[in-house]
Amino acid sequence: MLLLLVFISISPAQKKTQPYQPKAFTMPAPGQQSSLKRLLRFPFAKINRSDLKTGILHDRVLSFNFVTLRKLDGRKNSPAINFGDFKNLYFEMENAALPPFASRPLPLLLQEITAHLQTQKSMPLLIADFEYETVAEDALARGNLRENQAGQFEIEPAVPESPFVQHRLFMAVTPKTKIYHRQVEFQLSEDFHYGNSKNPLQNFEIDFADGLGVRALKISNSL
């Protein structure tokens, strides 16, 4: 994650008391970007999708889940999350992507899940497997990323190394945290498998907290 700090020096003669005027971030009209989104994306406007291996540069968004995000890499010690976390992180991936986004748009995903819950008895297991990138902390120091006069970052073509670091985001949740039924059928299928990973996981180990321990499953299993 690249952190930019701007320091402004004001001499005593220049100091004036000004009334506080908060910035107003209004909801954009359909098809328009918010002023906050434009502000976040401006420094990376010179970065093209072809410059990225994954098509997703997470520095283009403001993340409120960064610590959780970096822990969700699919390993055994990854923390458990709920459906709200799933939606928030999926939203970050979609907004950090340079078009086209290589997965279902979040509104469509939510519509499909709602339709399934209204018409089917099974509980879908939602799998999201993303690969994304962040700017390396030493990218400017190594010279493979430079800042132009407009305050935008550009890749230095003379340096062969990429200024970006690749990461993985793996999430597995159900759309409901509480289920009041004696018997529940969980569905694991391609219909609820999202993401842009070029090598998506196919084998899973899941503990349903039913006393039977961890079970090995594959896509298209129901139990």
Image (spheres, rainbow, N blue to C red):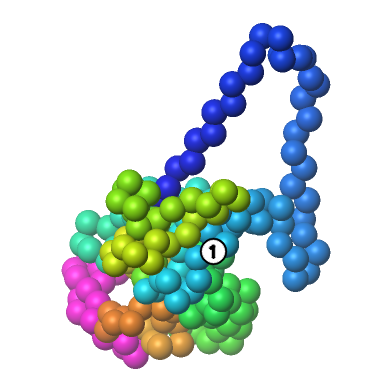
Number of numbered markers: 1
Give the residue at x 74% y 39%.
23
Give the residue at x 49% y 41%.
4
Q: Secondary structure at mark 1?
A: loop
Q: Which residues are magenta?
A: 203-223
Q: Is residue 98 magenta?
A: no
Q: Is residue 213 magenta?
A: yes
Is residue 214 or residue 4 the one in the foreground?
4
Indicate left or right for 154 with 218 as reference: right
Indicate left or right for 38 with 167 as reference: right
The answer to whether any part of residue 100 appears in the image is: yes
Q: Residue furthest bottom?
A: 220
As displayed, is residue 192 above or below residue 25? Answer: below
Q: Which residue is mark 1?
A: 46
What amino acid does circle 1 point to? Lys
Q: Position of residue 14 (x, y in %)?
A: 72, 15
